Image (tube, grey):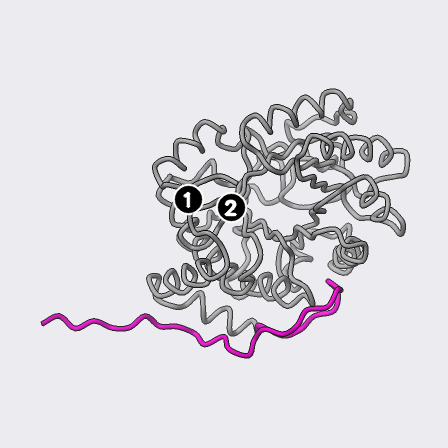
Amino acid sequence: MLETSSPVVINTDGLKTKPSASCDSTIERWRVADIVALFELPFSDLMYQAQTVHRDNFDANAVQVSTLLSIKTGGCSEDCGYCPQAARYHTEVEDEPLMQLQDVVAAAQEAKANGASRFCMGAAWRGPKQRDLEPVLKMIAEVKAMGLETCATLGMLKDGQAEQLKDAGLDYYNHNLDTAPEYYGDVISTRTYQDRLDTLDRVRSVDINVCSGGIIGMGESRNQRAGLLAQLANMARPPESVPINLLTQVEGTPLHGTESLDHLEFVRTIAAARITMPSSYVRLSAGRQSMPEGIQALCFLAGANSIFYGEKLLTTPNPEASVDKQLFAKLGINQI
């Protein structure tokens, strides 16, 4: 008779506490060591626990679909080491002006026709000036009027700007933490970790949903991957949407040539994100272009339940919508 062992399950009782509003203030639901312990579980046990948490909170066979459009490409004054849109790096990305309203509306109509339920607009700014923000507010209002959820990523926000975005109909604001606080300075020097938290607080204070995650595979350690997740999970109110990106290396950026991350470590990161943030949508974000279908399937099994449709994520290649629809059909996944 074969002996069977029960899956190893880390007891998370007592880790959840009632959230408040701030992203800057934190509640230690998860210690970094606890999250490292999740990463170190046998793979099948980690997947079992992540899938159990996922089924307790979501339809396990449904994935939310968004489309991301770069409405202002290139010329950014920041020095994020992964980003080809930084003006200081010599990449193939050109500095382009802000898109026209009618072109953004046309792209949103196409996204809706392809089944997207959320339309995200990204601009390569350190932060929007008021003259920049005003046309974006019109874009948000037009997209919202089409019946799509709206999301924007415009950089750091000043006092009063989140209120304007809220009034225009913005549903989500994306501002990633990128990595753990202790590794952040190795990747970015032109804005601080606190700058990012301050922007998220401005967004949260006007009751816009927060979309915030990070990039995996930038040379960080497993402890630092756990540190990123701890920072997100321990926010007084964790993000409603958590994009987990796999670094896409671009020639001309400082992180080009970084040793590639093992895909199964990325799957483990998705699983740990699902366990530590059970009610958040976990987005399988940039980097899917390099992932075999089997790895993407494991990510969905681990609790990823959001993706971007479209051939590009800002300037990063992404599988075409038709390819994703074929994968969903193979896996029996319904898009929402």
Against 220, residue 129 (above or below) is above
Q: Residue at x 48, y 31 (%)?
A: 319
Q: Which residues are magenta?
A: 1-30
Q: Residue at x 76, y 35 (%)?
A: 140
> Which of the 4 quarters of the picture holds residue 93?
top right
**Residue 124: where, in percent of width, then height?**
74, 36
Element assignment for label 2: strand
> Which of the 4 quarters of the picture holds residue 329?
top left
Are the residues tagged 1 and 2 within 8 Å (C-beta)? yes
Residue 8 in magenta? yes
Residue 6 in magenta? yes
The residue closer to the viewer here, 212 or 222, is 212
Amino acid type of the residue that numbered disc 1 sits on in the rendered structure: Gln
Q: Which residue is mark 2?
A: 284
Q: Where is the N terminus found, in terms of image quarters?
A: bottom left
Against 13, residue 188 (above or below) is above
**Labelled disc at residue 296:** 1
> Which of the 4 quarters of the picture holds residue 75?
top right
Q: Is residue 170 left or right of residue 108?
A: right
Residue that sits furthest to the left in the current view: 1
Amino acid type of the residue that numbered disc 2 sits on in the rendered structure: Leu
**Residue 286: where, in percent of width, then height?**
55, 41
Against 204, residue 318 (above or below) is above
Element assignment for label 1: helix
